[in-house]
Amino acid sequence: MIQQHPHQVRKNKTVQKGEWKIHNPSGSKRVIVTKELPGVRWLEILTGADCMVEIGTSTRILKTDDIQSFIGSHCDGVIGQLTENWGEKLLATLKNAHGKVYSNNAVGFNNVDVHAATGLNIPVGNTPGVLTETTAEMAVALTFAAARRVSESERFMRAGRFEGWLPNLFVGELLWRKTLGVIGIGRIGQAYARMMVEGHKMNLLYYDPYPNKALEEYITAYGEFLKSRGEQPVSCRHVTHIEELLEEAHCVSIHTALDQATHHLINAERLALMKNNAVLVNTSRGPVIDEAALVEHCRNHSNFRVGLDVFEEEPRLKSGLIDLDNAVLVPHIGSATMWTRQGMAILAASNLTAMLNGYPVWQCLDMLPFFSDDPPKAAPSIVNAKELGLPMHSCESYGNP
Ligand code: GLV
């Protein structure tokens, strides 16, 4: 569990103003956090940096106009959410209010116009490194929930329809020793691949612009280990055409970022290439799949199963999705473990205070030093650091390359 220091937070005054809660009203810098975040350490980081912190307590998604009017004429920085549209309009409002940083409480930043932020000289923070295993575990959960028809059979139980064991009741798919396809082999894709290859002895095909030699070597060595125990080895192969992966895999999981190249990467033609009884999982971003085409495909292929954590027009679902028995749907909770959500909040607060303090930007993959009692004087991750020419922090003192 991430260290908390509740006494420091408690001594700061809290005032309620409509849907906003104000901590440390005497702080010299005004910071907005658009939603309440888990844990208290993030708040301690902000108040410790002499910030007055105004937190939105509403659970509804804030509109651009609401945020604009709350920013007002002076705001030093904002921690915002992936549900908000941090386009040119909001970023310009922040700039005009003398804002110095926008910190996204997410690893993904497709909701932020980073190009506009760079033009306005606003650093944009994100929270990598703490979502990896948590999100990969959710992808595994969705994989088996879909393959083994968990939601469907739970609905059946709750409806009081279980009358006893039957040989044909909710028969699903065995994934053990079958072929896995992973689209996007960044940190989360790689963690998911290892969970499925090591745990379920699946052979991996992966599609990514960059081959991952370290992962290939790891899986080859693991295959050799299995062989040495008299077991079948496992394999790993990089494919340059997504079609090959879609045709061969029994289960496909999407872990790519959303950009112009990945928008509707999975469309009707590509769904048609997949096996009739394949499993498709998405924990990345909804618009990577053409959701209307997916609904149509699932309707026409009852043995095809999907597990979705993200949706094309969140929180709205495309018509018909909710009625599909072969779809497992969860409300964008891929990163929702307490450790990860507290970690994200700490990284988001650290990005913001580091930029207000003029600290350099951390260059290492390891984010754990930010959770220690003596965190680095650095911003964990600023996505436009290079473009803005921000100074970089050396990792040497932390034993990182
Ligand atoms: C969650 O989806 C994130 O991008 O942090």
Image (cartoon, rainbow, N blue to C red):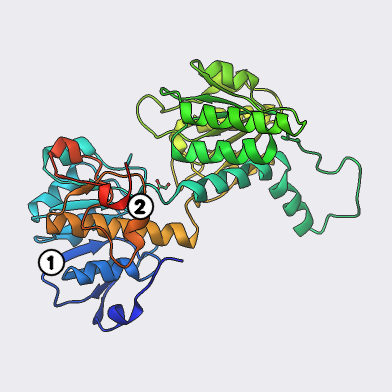
Residue beneath the point at 42% across and 66% down = 2
Q: Is mark 1 within 8 Å of ligand 1?
A: no
Q: CA distance from mark 2 to mark 1?
A: 26 Å
Q: Which mark is residue 29?
A: 1
Residue beneath the point at 24% across and 81% down = 12
Query: Residue 135 versus residue 305: which sits nearer the camera?
Result: 135
Mark 2 vs mark 1, foreground winner is 2
Q: Amino acid at mark 2?
A: Met
Q: Which mark is residue 6?
A: none
Which quadrant of the rendered structure holds the C terminus? top left
At label 1, counting other C-alpha atoms closer than 10 Å, the crowd grade (few under 14, some 14-19, many 20 or more) is: some
Name the image quarter holding residue 10. Answer: bottom left
Residue 72, how many percent across, how many down?
Answer: 13, 60
From the viewer's perspective, tell me whether residue 392 is left or right of residue 368: left
Name the image quarter holding residue 146. Answer: top right
From the viewer's perspective, tell me whether residue 126 is left or right of residue 354: right
Position of 369 relative to 394 (above/below): below
Residue beneath the point at 41% across and 27% down = 262
Q: Secondary structure at mark 1?
A: strand
Q: Earlier in the sequence, mark 2 or mark 1?
A: 1
Residue beneath the point at 32% across and 49% down = 399
Q: Which mark is residue 367?
A: 2
Name the image quarter holding residue 233. Answer: top right
